[in-house]
Image (spheres, helix red, strand yellow):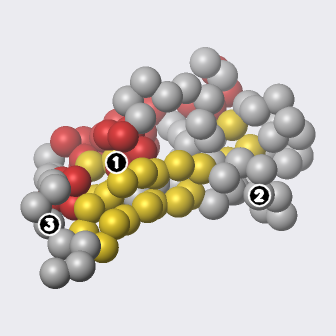
């Protein structure tokens, strides 16, 4: 909803459209979006200069882009969850976690 974002590097309409087009024409998918399709307010970046972490005005700039086979139960490794750790401070980005179950044979 922030109108100024359309002019910032990494968030221009062209860049976001290009990123989506790359996902659309490949078999790879955004793990967080697949597992949490209705999630709102989950960001990986907040401007420190503007003090945006506390009011949670951020962007989701960090992704795990995965093969869809990693979501299939018959594989030796299956993605179980993907989430952010927004309370981890020390950077303007937070860690993004990808939980993978490695099955024993």
Task: Please identify the quarter of the rendering in which residue 20 is found.
Answer: top left
Q: Which residue is rendered at x = 43% and y = 24% of the image?
A: 38
**The N terminus appears in which quarter of the rendering?**
top right
Q: Which residue is rendered at x = 36% and y = 54% of the image?
A: 80
Residue 16 visible from this viewpoint: yes
Which element carries disc 3, helix, strand or loop?
A: loop
Residue at the outermost left position = 74
Q: Would you say 7 lies left or right of 91 here?
A: left
Q: Would you say 50 lies left or right of 73 here?
A: right
Identify the mark at residue 96; answer none if there is no mark.
Answer: none
Which element carries disc 1, helix, strand or loop?
A: strand
* Eye-nearest disc, 1 or 3: 3
What separation in Å lies between label 1 and label 2 (alpha carbons)?
A: 22 Å
Give the residue at mark 1.
Answer: 30
Identify the mark at residue 88; answer none if there is no mark.
Answer: 2
What separation in Å lies between label 1 and label 3 (alpha carbons)?
A: 19 Å
Q: Which residue is rendered at x = 74% and y = 44% of the image?
A: 46
Query: Where's residue 67, x and y in %?
Result: 21, 60
Residue at the outermost front position = 105
**The C terminus appears in which quarter of the rendering?**
bottom left
* Eye-nearest disc, 2 or 3: 3
Identify the mark at residue 75; answer none if there is no mark.
Answer: 3
What separation in Å lies between label 2 and label 3 (alpha carbons)?
A: 32 Å
Do the residues under discs 1 and 2 have CB atoms within 8 angstroms?
Answer: no
* Eye-nearest disc, 1 or 2: 2
Which element carries disc 2, helix, strand or loop?
A: loop
């Amino acid at each position: 909803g922030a109108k100024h974002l359309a002019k910032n590097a990494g968030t221009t309409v062209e860049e976001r459209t290009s990123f989506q087009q790359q996902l659309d024409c490949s078999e790879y998918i955004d793990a967080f979006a697949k597992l949490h399709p209705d999630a709102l307010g989950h960001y990986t970046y907040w401007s420190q200069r503007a003090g945006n972490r506390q009011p949670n005005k951020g962007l989701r700039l960090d992704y795990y882009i995965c093969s869809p086979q990693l979501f299939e139960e018959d594989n030796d490794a299956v993605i179980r969850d993907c989430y952010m750790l927004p309370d981890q401070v020390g950077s303007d980005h937070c860690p993004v976690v990808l939980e993978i179950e490695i099955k024993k044979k």
